Structures are given as C-alpha cells and as structure tokens.
Image: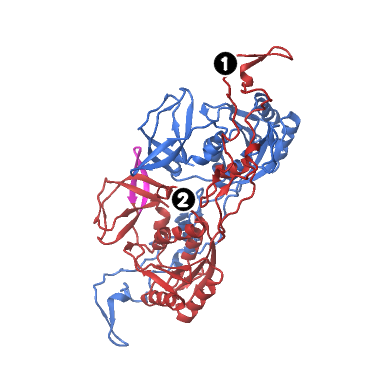
Chain colours: A blue, B red
C-alpha cells in the first residue's frame, strides 16, 4: 500500500479559479437575464435591484491556495471527484484494493457445481466471503477447497501469503480442524493467533491472528456465523488495509428502528445476533425474528438484518423498540 | 433488458440437499464431538442427553423443491449468492447495467484538465454525474462537451440515442439554452418533455422527458443541483432500468437523526434541500447547515448530507430534530 498524502490544491491553480458569470473588467455584479429587458443594441433595462458582488463567485470563495480539497483516507464520493475536476485534477493517487485469499477447508466440502453425496455439503462460504470482500473494497482470490490435513492446509496458507494482503480460512467446523488451523497459524510465524473463540452467537469458534504482518482469519463453517463474523471482525480490517478512515463510521451502517414482534431469549455472557425480517403493519415497522438453525442459508436470505442482544442481557421482550442493522 | 424469471430451485436438487452431519443409515441424531468421551475403538460415552433429530438438518428444511431462493428484481447480496451456491447454481441471469450517456452543454465549459480563461469554467458535472451513474448500477458514457447550438446539440442527443438506455444533459444554465434543450427533446420524438421546472431548491430548472422510450434528463448547471436532482429523479429511473425492486426502498437510503444547530429559512412553495455537516457535541449529533452558493462544489464536499424542508414550510427552527439523508 503506497502512502497517500492529503490532496492539496495545485500551487498555480488558485488564481485561475473562474468567477461564476462572464464578468467584464469593470463590472462588480451580474444580473439575471430573466430580470432584464432589452431596449436596443446599446441599452438594457434592469428590472430588479442588484447589489455589488451579487451572482459573482469571488476568487478563493470556493477553494483557495493551500486548501485541502479531499482528505486522505476517505472514499471518493461523486462530489469529491467533482471538486477535484473543478481544480483541474483529473488523476489522483488512491490506495490499492487489498487482495484477500479465501481458503475453504473441510473434508465434507465439495465445489458448488457438483452434486454432493451423503455427508457432503456444497461450498457456500467461499461465495459469501468473496462477495463480502468485494463489497468491502477488496479483491477476493478463491484459492479452492483443501482437505483437513496439517501439511496440505499449511501449504495452502503459506502459498497465499505470497500474494495476499489478508487471508480468510472458511470451514473446518470439527474440533480437530479448528485446533489444527490455530496450530498452523502459530507454527508459520509470529505473532500467530491473537484470539480463538469469541462471546458471540453465531460465531463462537472464530479465530483471528497475524502472520508476519498479514491478518489471518478462521471463520466458523455456518453461513450465518460467516456473515456476522465478517461484518464485525474482517470488514474493519479490510477498510483499514484500504486506507479508509470514515468520517462517521458509527453512523455508516444502515440501521432502522423497528418494534420487536416476539420475545427473544439469549444466554448471558455472549452477544447474540438475531436475524430478523422487517414487516410493515399499519404503518409501523416490525422486526420479526427469523427462526432456523444457523447452518441454514435461507434464513439469511429471508432476513433483512440483525438485532444485537448485548453480552449481559437475557433477551429482549416483545414490543420493545430495537435497532435493526440491515444486511 | 432481458426478462428474468424468479429463480427456482432446480427440479432434481431437493432430494440431494445434504444433511448437516454425516448421518449413517439408522441414526436419527448427531452428538457433538465435544460431548463425547472415547472409551475404546468400539465404544463412546455420550455425556449429554440427545433428542431425535438433534443437530440434523432434514431434507427440505432449508430449501425444498419449488421454493423460490432468490426473487427477481433484487440486488444479489452475499447471502443470496451463497444460497444459489448451496443449491448448486453457480451462474445466474442478471439484468444488464443501463448505459447512460452524459452530454455536457455550455459555451463556457472547458475540459477539466484545461486551465480556464476568464468567463470559462471547468467541466465538473460530467464527473459528478458519471460517478453517480456508476453508484446507481449504470455504466456512464461521457459524450463530451457540446456548444449551445441547436443543430450541434440535437446531433449529440440523436447520436446518443443509438447506444444509450438513458441520456443526461448537463449544464445549459442560460435561459436560451434551457429552452433550447427542451425544444430539441420535443423535436426529436414523442412524448418529449414531460416536465420542465420543479418546485425544488436547488434544482428548479430540471427537465425530464422521454424520446422514443429513452428517458432524457436536463440537469441544471450547479453541482449542488446536480447532486440533489440526480438523487430524486434519475437514480430511481436507473434502478428501474436495471430491474431493481428494493424490498424496503423507503428505508434504503442512509439517514441519521440529528439536532439542527441554527434556524434555516425556506420559501413556501418549494422543497428546500439544505446541505449539512454532522458534528458530535457531547455525545449528541448535530446537523450544521453548510452555507455557500449552490455553484460552489466545496459546499458539497464539506456536507455530509442534506435535510429537506417540505413544500409548505417556512423553515426549521434551531434545536429541532431532523432526518439527515447522508450523501
């Protein structure tokens, strides 16, 4: 990632910023054509009073020399690109998009286009993770499906380290595999695993680590856990890798207020992310919990978003107002 | 645009949806490895009671034959792509992105990389519009800058009709030009201009029309007006052209509640969109109006969003709570 300086107005451009109207040498205001009657070729009648400076943009009123036009670390919005064009900047240095390798693990995983035999499941997560990486400004690299075997999996992670800014392991839901992924991360290089297991549902067996400066994540196998864990742990890291410093990060995810349709229980000591559908009933917005195991992908498709039950709460009662974070 | 049918689960796939665990022929539940102690090669001790069906996903519990997995007209989210992968669908028909031609008009407009002489201004709007088209799912085609001359401008619009799903004219702020654009739209084909002028600030001189099935818009020259008018009039049309039927359109633009920092006046009879910055003061969010002429691009860069003063209100008083639509 190349460092990018705050973008400054080029030194020679401030004096060239044009005024709003066509202002001849001695004029100090502009009248609107609509407020003028043409008397003859020499004379006009101005129908409305006009003050000095009216309808004129002074040099430096919009941007002046030394002003910062676009700040480092922000996503370029249409108006930011317009502001650059306005000062004659049609090329700008940007951070490169982080390359994110996705390694699917699990002896039970088969490619999605193949019909799975009994006991096998199609690879769903590499598709979900790829799409989330793209959404977060990264470039996904699907490395394929690897067997739950130490040497094989270690080889895959080591190979990915040569062309990735971050690595995401998906699957490995069995106890043995989870431990193996953590062991490999520790074995390859320091600092290795930073955390293994979070007080979160779904998503408990999440692994987060760093190997030689490259963030490595181990996601649980259930699609619902993938979605929640990516949102909470991986998206902020990808934003950081792509140089993003949002001005209002706390307000930037789309949330809506809704009334909870039924009691939702939760165990104390873990943060519970409950998927909900939104329904409008007599003009009011309701959040209806979507029931179903976290291994089911369709519960995610039916859900419009999730509500969070905090670590120390036992649940939320029906009719309470909740914030729904939209997917 | 090709019609796309609701995506249905392939007829032969329901019976092949795998169960969650490796379920041997006569077993009806799965116990977690963590709850088992291995006694010897033949025997395990199960440490926790288990009920029939536990940890098993039944055939059809997630998706069954005939279920609609992904509905026509929605943007494919990561979980939707995952759901398709889960039923073995790795390719899917989508709407093509609408091609949107952008025609800049105005004798005073010079390309952004050129240093403008007195009375000339750099082309800002084609950059702003291109970025907004991309954001809305379209593909922008910048056709260039055209002089305010009937034949010339008519030729540009007619040429654009051969390769565009929509056409956006930008600029032509002078009275003569505005009328000329409307006249050309009417002259080329029916139904022509549908509206010319809206009760909106900024954005009053907006033109909307259709020529032989192709939507044509004339945007005012001021960047602030471009931003607001695009959002209100053009984005919904591009969504329609790209087949999008959002499930919760009214909740899909990102808005935040904030307290207005000062009185804002407005004329009755027009909808006033006032640009504001967000500021956090002692934990509360404030909306601070950004002052400055609508011709200034930097007011848009400084603004985080806009508040709307409805048609029949004279303004909003300081300390009132307002909804800020984030840019």
Give how far across and how far down residue B193 sits, in percent.
40, 72
What's the magenta bit mostly, secondary-structure-wise? strand
Q: Secondary structure at mark 2?
A: loop
Give how far across and how far down residue B9 sits, in percent.
60, 44
Residue position marked by numbered label 2 in the rendering? B246
Give how far across and how far down residue B276 sits, in percent.
36, 52
Disc on res. B282: none
Instruction: Please name whichever residue, A195 or A260, is drawn nearer the observer in this view of the structure.
Output: A260
Q: Which residues are magenta?
A: B275-288
Q: Outermost residue, top direction?
A: B39
- Residue B116 shows up from this direction: no
- Residue A184 shows up from this direction: yes
Question: Relative to B270, is A19 on the left or the right?
Answer: right
Residue position marked by numbered label 1 in the rendering? B49
The chain containing the residue under callout 1 comes to B
Question: Relative to A59, is A185 on the left or the right?
Answer: right
Instruction: Please name whichever residue, A229 or B188, is drawn nearer the observer in this view of the structure.
Output: B188
Give how far across and how far down residue A30 sits, in percent.
32, 73
């Amino acid at each position: 990632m190349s460092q990018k300086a705050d973008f400054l107005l080029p030194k020679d451009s401030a004096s060239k910023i044009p005024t709003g109207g066509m202002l001849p040498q001695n004029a100090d205001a502009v009248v609107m054509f609509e407020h003028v009657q043409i008397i003859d070729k020499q004379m006009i009648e101005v129908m409305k009073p006009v003050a000095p400076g009216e309808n004129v943009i002074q040099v430096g009123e919009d941007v002046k020399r030394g002003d910062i036009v676009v700040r480092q670390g922000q996503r370029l919005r249409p108006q930011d690109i317009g502001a650059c064009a306005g000062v004659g900047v049609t090329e700008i240095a940007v951070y490169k998009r982080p390359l994110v390798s996705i390694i699917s693990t699990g002896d039970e995983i088969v490619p999605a286009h193949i019909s799975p035999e009994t006991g096998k499941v199609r690879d769903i997560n590499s598709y979900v993770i790829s799409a989330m990486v793209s959404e977060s400004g990264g470039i996904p690299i699907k490395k394929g499906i690897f067997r739950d075997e130490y040497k094989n999996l270690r080889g895959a992670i080591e190979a990915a380290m040569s062309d990735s800014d971050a690595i995401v392991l998906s699957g490995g839901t069995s106890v043995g595999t989870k431990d193996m992924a953590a062991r490999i991360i520790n074995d390859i290089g320091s600092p290795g695993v930073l955390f293994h297991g979070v007080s979160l549902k779904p998503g408990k067996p999440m692994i987060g680590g760093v190997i030689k400066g490259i963030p490595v994540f181990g996601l649980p196998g259930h699609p619902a856990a993938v979605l929640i864990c990516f949102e909470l742990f991986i998206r902020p890291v990808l934003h950081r890798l792509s140089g993003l410093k949002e001005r209002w990060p706390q307000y930037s995810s789309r949330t809506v207020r809704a009334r909870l349709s039924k009691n939702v229980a939760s165990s104390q000591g873990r943060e519970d992310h409950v998927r909900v559908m939104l329904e409008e009933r007599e003009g009011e917005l309701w959040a209806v919990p979507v029931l179903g195991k976290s291994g089911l992908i369709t519960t995610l498709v039916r859900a419009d978003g999730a509500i969070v039950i905090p670590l120390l709460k036992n649940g939320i009662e029906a009719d309470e107002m909740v914030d729904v974070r939209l997917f």
